[in-house]
Image (tube, helix red, strand yellow):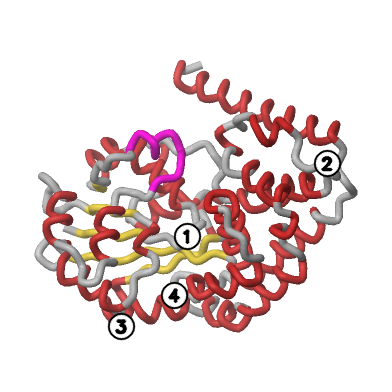
Amino acid sequence: MKILLHIGAPKTGSSAIQTFLSMNRAVLAERFGVVYPEYPFDKTARLGRPTTGNGAELARLAIRTPPGDLGACIEALLPCVRSDATVVLSSELLWPMEEPTIHALREAFAPFGEFRVLFYAGGQARLLASGYWQSVKNHGRKNPFPEYARERGGAFEYARRLALFRRVLGDEGVTLRPYVRTAFPEGDIVLDFLASLGVPQDAAACLELPRNDVNATADAAIYVSSLVNNLAGGAPGWLQNSAPPAELAALVPMAVAPARRPDALLSNAQLREVAERFRDENRRLARMPGMEGVDLDEDNRAFVDAHAALTAFPAATPMELLLLQSLIQLRSRVAELERKMDVGGV
């Protein structure tokens, strides 16, 4: 049995991967020998909403000091799995694990088969900005972005994490992939994930891919945020009170929180400082196996440039925001009709 432990990194499309695995569980197991064990929030994942993945309980036990009963947890996740299967366990909660936890997992997995770790590395400025907006929205974070970036930036020092995993698992025990759209087959992270499982790209024709675009959330959040924060009277009622379409549910709240907290709006200088911090590491990463010439420093620069362009817009009027709302609703309605046509075989 082979076991793939997908651990993130945070803000690198884990929800899209977990949605895909939940939606296609039966076909993946029957046709490709890829098993994604069920977990309590399967329904949430199938709806495309963020979850902690089917490896969440394993992560909670593993990061304890000392770790919990990992063997029993793993055994519970692998009922009646055939010996030639590839089992996928996924959870971003495993991302912060350090060397003692990795050793504990290796020993716990040993009776069941070989396992390796997979993680995606994305542009740090983009991921830190997205994480900051989420922390303001969900947790009422009070400290400014530079402080958050200093506190959380270490999570995206990929070279250190790669060296850590390789010390314990060896070179073959960890797979690094870039979280950059241009590096994915057809620009889709799910197809890239399938390739890491050894599933050929043309096999995706029999699988259902998530429809939501999970790779452009940060750029879209910046756009909405720039409009809302330039509105003199603060966020309009429809942003504060109404439920946005599912595909933008994660974006509009990210914009509303900074509108209520003007100090939470990121500046171009702050983002450039983050990009500069990781410049040398990203050049080294571009020479590592798995990255194949992808320069995350280039992704950081593109993100900073996009932010500078979007926040340079003149103040948005209520009419412009209403137009934006209409466009969002229209896009959501078109996507809904497309789904109905697919189901009905039209």
Q: Which amino acid does label 4 sit on?
A: Pro
Tell me how far mark 3 sits from mark 4, CA to CA: 16 Å
Q: Determine which quarter of the picture holds residue 96.
A: bottom left
Tell me how far mark 4 sits from mark 2, CA to CA: 51 Å
Residue 289's tag is 4
Q: For the residues carrying marks 3 and 2, which lies nearer the camera in this image?
A: 2
Residue under the image location 12 percent in, 46 percent down? 79
| Callout 1 crowding tier (Cα within 10 Å): few <14, some 14–19, many ≥20 | many
Which of the two residues, 101 or 263, is positioned nearer the viewer here?
263
Sequence-earlier tag: 3 or 2: 3
Tell me how far mark 1 sits from mark 3, CA to CA: 22 Å
Q: For the residues carrying marks 1 and 3, which lies nearer the camera in this image?
A: 1
**Which structural element holds mark 3?**
helix
- The mark total stands at 4
Residue under label 2: 233
From which residue to which does the magenta span run?
42-51
Left or right relative to 315: residue 340: left
Sequence-earlier tag: 3 or 4: 3
Q: What residue type is labelled 1?
A: Pro
Sequence-earlier tag: 1 or 4: 1
Residue under label 3: 167
Q: For the residues carrying marks 3 and 4, which lies nearer the camera in this image?
A: 3
Q: Where residue 97 sits in the image (x, y, percent)?
A: 34, 70
Query: Is residue 256 magenta-colored?
Result: no
In the rendered structure, are the residues bearing label 3 and label 4 in contact, judged by CB atoms less than 8 Å apart? Answer: no
| Callout 3 crowding tier (Cα within 10 Å): few <14, some 14–19, many ≥20 | some
Residue 84's tag is none
Residue under label 1: 10
Q: For the residues carrying marks 4 and 2, which lies nearer the camera in this image?
A: 2
Picture layout, residue 289 above or below residue 11: below
Q: What residue type is labelled 3?
A: Arg
Sequence-earlier tag: 4 or 2: 2
